[in-house]
Image (tube, rainbow, N blue to C red):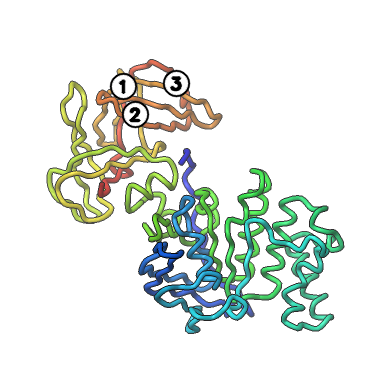
Amino acid sequence: MGSAAPEAPARTARPAAGAAAASPGIHIESLSVDYGAQAVIEALDLDIERGSFFTLLGPSGCGKTTLLRTIAGFVPARGGRIRFGERDVTALPPHLRDIGMVFQDYALFPDKTVFDNVAYGLRARRVDAAGVRRRVGEALERVGLAALAARLPAALSGGQRQRVALARALVIQPQVLLMDEPLSNLDAKLRLQVRQTIAELQAEAGITTVFVTHDQDEALALSHRIGVMNRGRLEQVGTPAEIYRRPATGYVADFVGAANLLPVTLARAAAAGETAQAVLAGGPGGAPTRLAALAVAALGAGEALLMARPETLRLAHADADAGAGAGAAALPVRVLRRQFLGDKTSYRVQLASGAELQVDRHGAGHDAHQVGDAALLAFDPTATLVLAR
């Protein structure tokens, strides 16, 4: 993935009063799902707190949409259980699970007005006409589309259509809201606007929400917790800060934000949370270099991965002390490329071993290094991690 700024502070789940407070948690036990003869998800366990915004994050084909559609009831489970609170919904069809669903392609009725699209679920539930008018009006007001109630979807922008889809999902006051990449068809500006709308409405309603995306920025900005998926299993579940700052594996580190990953060797085993001594081959003059790094999980002696975010690395001129005050060893590097990005400069540097790393510098003088410069690189021992290879 490309470079990403450190995430916004994790949102705090605060279920609202009233109907939203009844929104249950989601409990998944030993879930297995097949497509034909192929196992897509195998023995997956997951607990999603009531009223929280939970994101399933991962690349195409990792199983995140399959998991969402299984929670919704569109895909049957081969084994395991899904519960909404204490209610077992594993065998229930979608219309009996009390869910709201927002799709990537909006799924609006093209021949129905905005009002009638939002009213559809209420009418299917036999809500009286006065109740429909009141609740649809309130829902459209919440998404800022009350003035467009009489329009057809073709007369709306992409962002407006997605807000109609969101209003339609929320107006029925479902127990659970499920969203399948709802922002992927929008341009960058609209994505930010609708993302903010989703965050505000979810916080207001306090509804348990499962959101699927491959976009790390969306996941970091919106979520109370994130589950990073890889080949049908959850690689790591945690808050945005935990996922970004303490990735459990090299896969998570590389997928969520930009990460520099280097093969290293541990001379001895390290306990979780312990500072380990990672040996990096091919240092100055070909000699190995010892770097201090935090072990996220217990590791045995032998092969491992060193992980450092670009913004945690220090870059200084060759005649300076790059690790001053940080207790870090400085390694000689050469600047291969640079990109001036306004508030920062992103550099590509090369170690003596030939390995290349990305370094993002902020603050005064962040653009002081030029292509071809010799420089010194230091790893911050408090922000550098060692992971299982």
Disc 2 residue type (three-letter): Glu
The residue sitting at the front extreme is 37
Q: Tell whether 56 sits left or right of 306.
A: right
Task: Examine the image and state in which quarter residue 324 appears.
Answer: top left
Query: Where is residue 34 shown, x and y percent of the image?
Result: 43, 66
- Numbered disc 1: secondary structure: loop
**What residue do we see at 36% from left, 34% from top?**
313
The residue that mark 3 highlights is 368
Q: Position of residue 371 (x, y in %)?
A: 42, 17
For the residues marked 3 and 1, what is the alpha-carbon distance in whole angstroms?
A: 13 Å
Q: Look at discs 3 and 1 and give the one toward the viewer.
A: 3
Which residue is found at the position 57% from the left and 78% from the top? 93
Say whether disc 3 or disc 1 marks the residue closer to the N-terminus.
Answer: 1
Query: Helix, strand, or loop for circle 3?
Result: loop
* Residue 359: quadrant of the picture: top left
Residue, disc 1: 320
How far apart in space, not on screen, are marks 2 and 1 (Cα)?
Answer: 21 Å
How crowded pointer 2 is (Cα within 10 Å; few <14, some 14-19, many 20+) is rated as some
Q: Amino acid at mark 1?
A: Ala
